Image (cartoon, rainbow, N blue to C red):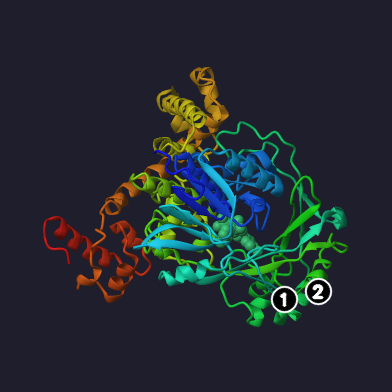
Amino acid sequence: MTLSNPSWYSFDVVVVGAGHAGVEAALAAARLGANTALLTMSCDTVAQMSCNPAIGGVAKGQIVREIDALGGEMGRVIDATGIQFRMLNSGKGAAMHSPRAQADKKAYQFEMKWRVEQQENLALRQEMVAGLVTEDGRVTGVKVAGGAVYHAPAVILTTGTFLQAIMHTGEAKTEGGRAGEKAAHGLSAELLGLGFELERFKTGTPARLNGRTIDFAQCTVQPGDEDPQPFSYLTEKITQPQMDCHLTETTPEMHDLIRDNLSRAPMYSGQIESTGPRYCPSIEDKIVRFADKATHQIFLEPEGRNTLEYYCNGISTSLPRDVQDRMIRMIPGLQNAEIMRFGYAVEYDFAPPTQLHPTLETRMVEGLYFAGQLNGTTGYEEAAGQGLIAGVNAALKVAGQEPFILNRSQAYLGVLIDDLVTKGVDEPYRMFTSRAEYRMLLRQDNADRRLTPVGIQLGLVDSDRKASFESYEVEVQHALKLISSVRHQGRTLEEWLRRPEIGWSDVEQMSTELTEASLSERAERHATIEAKYAGYIKRQEAEIARLQKIDSVRIPGTFSFAGVPQLRHEAREKLGRLKPATVGQASRVSGITPADIAVLMMYLNAHAAGAESP
Ligand SMILES: Cc1cc2nc3c(=O)[nH]c(=O)nc-3n(C[C@H](O)[C@H](O)[C@H](O)COP(=O)(O)OP(=O)(O)OC[C@H]3O[C@@H](n4cnc5c(N)ncnc54)[C@H](O)[C@@H]3O)c2cc1C
């Protein structure tokens, strides 16, 4: 890809918003050689964590590993700036192991900004984007406050919670996408004018406390793992000291106070009508929905090494300030706690993601891409993953190359985007392991084996990662070959490893060849998992091969679903509106039945055999 116009306002790709989606989008596009501008409201809030100071968690940790395997930045930055690392679900099966880390919030931001600043082909600029420029159904640039226009054939919007955003704390309403920051006006009206649908979601955050005023002796210490595992495949070891989190809980007295004040909570007074994340409810929601629970856990999480600010994970709220102040003091350890920032909820516009192609390009305007919270998702990791995919596709499009689409059997990122564009969202979408059909394959330990070869092929991955991956791959292949060929008492070592009570150290004692191979701990762990779950893995691979058949049947863009009389009315209407690109995608649209798919296949086969398109 060649760099195009070097003038100040002309780029190949313009990314709007430097949140978690925006930075990954801009880095990916620039790394593929596109001359990229990252325009954001404030250069001081690059990759800011709006809510809890943590990266990863169940299913989200797997996404961070995938972003890293594709050459993204989130994993490396949290490894450099994390203050506590834990492998969640380490007592469960390998598919459930999920890395999570507390971040030093400010250090994370600075580290990400530093990497963005250092990236060749990438210009970070403080600009408020007020509108889009389009010509004949194609985007050609963006307008910024003050009247200047940036020109680009590809634009990625990653505006997060900022479009027409309103914050609520009790009866008080303020314009703004995040405490202390402005809302973005202009873009929503432009998008509506172009024919896009927009809807409203809400999310919320808890109060932050001054640690000097917390009595930690009344709380339970929660330390990090003794052997902290990095997120990035390039980080050899986490060497920085870890900090503790602390655990406390809500009290019946606090629940009574909240119940007595529900009429002042914007969610219950009717002041907020939009839907919030069901799996991340506010404390007032928890008290109503789980009325029989006497207490709820609260994690007190440090916001960094150089601050005493603490995040109260578990009690997100938009209750009025006076209620927040009283309820905090009813919690063990927080009787004298001082609030530094009050909790609040924010309502914002999002664009229902069924308006997107799987590349995250909009169906309505060519060259315009959406990523992150703007697509109705919630979470830093979900946003960053979409950003990377949109950035890659925008750069490929500008270079006239084939698009990049991950499928559901390759990555959680494939599941995420397929769910968004085929099913849409009726509440803020977050990733769960249960959303993935093939979670035995989509593990956190093998994201590099699944995705780094793709990253290498695309040119996203730098030479260090390529070299490190290739030498690891040689080692893994060697380990797999040894366990499948070396025998002990008539069985292969792989067969021995399938027994639950047998681990790597046991099979090492059965053969000198394994010890002589001096494999890394990672390669040993990987080979053990592959052996233990070989049965499941084979079954899932067979299922994928079966489904890939319908996923590979393409539906021409010009296909008229309305012209297939045997399709049910609902199927004609839904498929006509969503325009799936393959029969596999069509089969995953909610409400589409196997019978609809059989009819569709019949028509497409007839079409392929030379009959007229309906
Ligand atoms: C109060 C609150 C509570 C939240 N609670 C949770 C939670 O409990 N769990 C969870 O998983 N997630 C939560 N989130 C969501 C989480 O912050 C987002 O999922 C994540 O940050 C989305 O990343 P993003 O890149 O899409 O957007 P953001 O991180 O919001 O970044 C958007 C960026 O775009 C910039 N921008 C916007 N409009 C313009 C414009 N017109 N011109 C220039 N720049 C612009 C902004 O300045 C910002 O830098 C919460 C967010 C908020 C605000």
**x then y, percent, for residue 166:** 63, 71
- Residue found at x 79% / y 54%: 309
Location of residue 118 with respect to 130 vertically, above or below: above
Residue closer to the observer: 469 or 357: 357
- From this viewpoint, is residue 434 visible? yes
Indicate the amino acid at tag 2: Asp
* Label 1, label 2: how far apart the Cα atoms are: 9 Å
Image quadrant of ligand 1 equals bottom right
Left or right for 415, reference 115: left
Please tell me whether mark 1 sits on a helix, a strand or a loop: loop
Indicate the amino acid at tag 1: Gly
Location of residue 108 with respect to 526 vertically, above or below: below
Residue closer to the observer: 167 or 544: 167
Q: Quadrant of the N terminus?
A: top left
Q: Quadrant of the C terminus?
A: bottom left
- How many numbered discs, if any? 2
- From this viewpoint, is residue 430 visible? no
Left or right for 365, reference 92: left
User: Which of the numbered marks, if any, corresponds to residue 170?
Assistant: 1
- Residue found at x 70% / y 33%: 239
Please tell me whether mark 2 sits on a helix, a strand or a loop: helix
**Callout 1 crowding tier (Cα within 10 Å): few <14, some 14–19, many ≥20:** many
**Callout 2 crowding tier (Cα within 10 Å): few <14, some 14–19, many ≥20:** few
Location of residue 447 with respect to 21 vertically, above or below: above
Left or right for 150, reference 111: left
**x then y, percent, for residue 366:** 37, 58
Location of residue 75 with respect to 189 vertically, above or below: above
User: Which of the numbered marks, if any, corresponds to residue 485?
Assistant: none
According to the picture, the residue beneath numbered tag 2 turns out to be: 322
